[in-house]
Image (cartoon, rainbow, N blue to C red):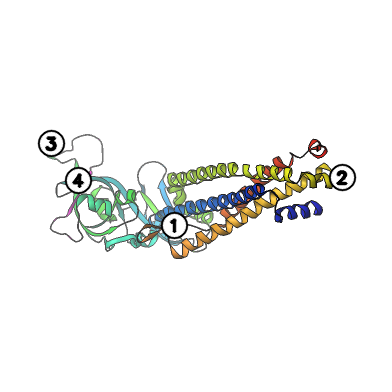
Amino acid sequence: MRFPLYIAKRYLRSKSSQNAVNIINAVTFAVIVIGSAALFIVLSGFSGLKSFSVSFSNTFDPDLKAFPISGKTFVLDPEMAEALRSLPEVASYSAELEERVYLTHNQKSSIAYIRGVDSAYSGTTGIDSALFTGQWDLIGQQTVTGIGVANLLSLTVQDYRSPLIVLAPKPGKGGLGSGGLSEKPYNQVSLVLSGVYQLEKNLDQKYLFAELPLVQSLLERDYDQVSAVNFKLAPGVDEKTARAAISNVMGANIELKNRRQLNQTLYRMLNTENLATYLIFTLVLIIALFNVVGAIIMMILDKQEHSRTLYSLGLTLKDLRRIYFVQGVLVTVAGGLIGLVIGSILILSQQYFGWLKITPSLAYPVSYELLNVLLVLVTITVLGLLAAKIASNRINYKLLKNG
C-alpha cells in the first residue's frame, strides 16, 4: 500500500503537461471544497434554527408535566401536594387549571385559553423572563397575556377603567339551569392586565394567565381540582428517576411528559426539515463528485505511458487501480477537510460577530456541533470512496497494452 500511496501523492502534487487536465483537476477540487463547506453551513444553520425554536419551549414548558389520562381534571389533595413537595428529585412544582374561554374588550373579541396558576408557576417554568412589558402579577383579578392577545383586543397595562371581560361556559349538561331563561349559561369575570409576554406567535395569541383560585371559581371547580402539574427537576437529577418518584406519588392515572413530548409536532417538523435539507445537499454533492470520476479518468489517460511503464516494471493491474483509487480518495478527503475549515470559520464568526442578521437586533442563529462535522466527513468520505472506485476501475489490460 505504501508504493501506490507514494505514486498517488506524486500525481496529486505534480502538474500535467496538458493544461486542460490541470484546469479540470482544479475545478474538481474547488467543487468538493465548496460542496462540503455548503453542506456544513446549511446543517449548522438548521441546528441553530432548531435550538432557537426549542428555546421558546424551554421558557414556556416545565421539565416534566403531569396530565390526567382520562378527563380534563384530577384532584391534587393536600396529602399528595405535601408528598410531591418532599421529593428530593423535584426542585419545585406548580399546579394549573386550563380551559378555553371567550374574551371581550371594547367591542373586540377573541377565543383563548385561560390558565390559572399558583405562585410557584413562574419559578417552575421561567415564563416571567419572557415579559415584554409590565410585571408578572396575578394577585386578585389581574392577568398576564401574550402580546398577540393584547394587540388583538387593544389591551393596555393597568387599565382599571376598561378591564378585560372573560366568559366561560358553566359546567354540566343541558341548556337551561334552575333559573330558566333568565339564567346566563356562562360565568363572567373582569381582569386587569398587569403584564404582557412575548415568545412565539402561536403562544402569544393563545394564552392568558390568572390566579389559580380565581380560575377555579370561574370554572366552578373545587379548590383541589387541577388540569396539570408542572415540575422543575433538581439539578443533576435523572429524568427516569424523577418520573418514577413522581408516578409513585401521583398514581397510575397520571401521564408525565417532558418538553420534547409536549412539543412533538415542532420536533418532528424540525427533524424532517433537517433530514430533507441533508438529502438535497447530499444529492448535490453526488452530482459534484462526478467531477472526481471525470478528473481521475482524465488523469488515467494523461498518465497512460507512466502506467504502462509501471506495469512493465512489475506492478499488477490491481496495484495500478489502487494508485488512482488512493488519488481520488486523497482529493475528496482533502477537499472535504478544507471545506470544513472554511465552513467552521464562517459559522464561528457568525456565532461571535453575528454579521448575518434576520432583523437589525437579531443575528441569524447557527450552532457549531461536532455531529455535523462528523456527518459531513462521513458523507464526503463515503461518496469519495465510491467515486474513486468507479473511476479507478476504468484502467484495464486493454488500456495498458494498446499504444
**Hey, what amino acid is under mark 4?**
Ser
Q: Which residue in the structure is indicated by mark 2?
A: 312
- Identify the element where label 4 is drawn: strand
In the rendered image, residue 135, in percent from the top left (x then y), is placed at 27, 64
**Hey, what amino acid is under mark 1?**
Pro
Q: Which residue in the structure is indicated by mark 4?
A: 109
Mark sitting earlier along the chain (4/2):
4
Q: Which residue in the structure is indicated by mark 1?
A: 365
Distance between the Cα atoms at labels 3 and 4? 24 Å
| Disc 4 to disc 2: CB gap under 8 Å | no
In the rendered image, residue 292, in percent from the top left (x then y), is placed at 65, 45
Q: Quadrant of residue 391?
A: top right
Residue mark closest to the camera, 3 vs 1: 1
Q: Camera-side residue: 78 or 353? A: 353
| Vertical arrangement, residue 377 with respect to residue 284, above or below | below
| Disc 2 to disc 3: CB gap under 8 Å | no
